Image: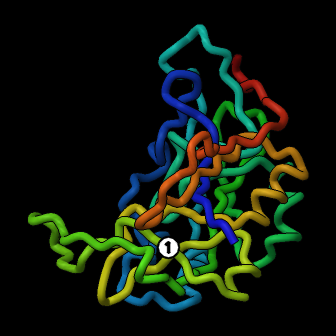
Amino acid sequence: MEVLKISGSGDKNGLAITGITLDMRLGPLAFMNPDDAPNPPLAARRDAAKKWPGVRVVAEHGQEKRLKTYLQDAIGPGFSFPGCDLAVSDRAREILEPILGSQVAFLDLDVVNAGRKYWAFYPTQYYSNLDPELCELSPPYSSAADRRPMMRKVGFVQSEELEQLNVFRVPSTAAYSVFAPGTFATQKFLDLVMKHQLGGFTFRKNFHKGFRPSPGEQQVIVSNGPKYPLADY
């Protein structure tokens, strides 16, 4: 089963989403990313989700004023907090929540100027069955306090457990820290998004060690769906 990395739509030219700046800074939300801890408990992300304080972010025109600014069912670049880099519309939540079940927590989010409700899309499931032949480790930065090697490329063992997942995160261990892990999705989640025309999801090939794309192979897939103008424009 193919595994991809996912994010949402948005860029600095067409759409700017300011960070967690109105109600708090990123520091107090560090507990939302337990992935970096050595061997975090399986329930670490579910427990973190229960402590979510709720935050506000702002959607506004990007740097290129001539571009028409809009939101979609998934918004990503420009929006992130520790352990989460994707938010989805209420429409997407209503479709996805009954299917994803406990694999994702939808966390209350106030997106100023959006004109509609959005939720932080916070995966709660870990998958740690990695294929060492497909993973790539590198030494830590010389200035890093964490002296564990960094897992820069991740490859997965195909298993029945993986086939049951839609989205998941990869935890660090005592032997390594996962460098910029992000959120992974299986083909079944891509199919689900396409079936329901949930716009704005960006799926990228997972470049594990030794990955060589075929000539002409599509590396990035962006889902199409409704476009929502900002409320104040």
- Give the crowd class for mark 1: few <14, some 14-19, many >=20 residues within 10 Å: many
Q: Quadrant of the N terminus?
A: bottom right
Which residue matches tag 1?
155
Residue plotted at (53% across, 60% down): 206
Q: Where in the figure is residue 15, as x and y percent of width and height?
A: 58, 27
Q: Locate residue 224 relative to residue 146 in the image: left or right.
A: right
Which of the 4 image quadrants contains residue 186? bottom right
Name the residue furthest front: 215
Amino acid type assigned to the residue bearing label 1 in the image: Gly
Q: Give me the residue at 41% from left, 90% from top.
A: 39
Q: Is residue 35 visible?
A: yes
Q: Position of residue 75 (x, y in %)?
A: 65, 43
Q: Is residue 72 left or right of residue 26?
A: right
Identify whether 180 is placed above or below 151: above
Q: Is residue 29 visible?
A: no
Q: Quadrant of residue 52?
A: bottom right
- Identify the residue at horizontal 74%, vertical 37% (top origin): 72
Report how many numbered discs are placed on residues in the image: 1
Depth order, front residue of 140/103: 140
Q: Nearer the viewer, residue 183 or 78?
A: 183
Using the image as rendered, state which of residue 19 and residue 149 is in the foreground. Answer: 149
**Callout 1: helix, strand or loop?**
loop
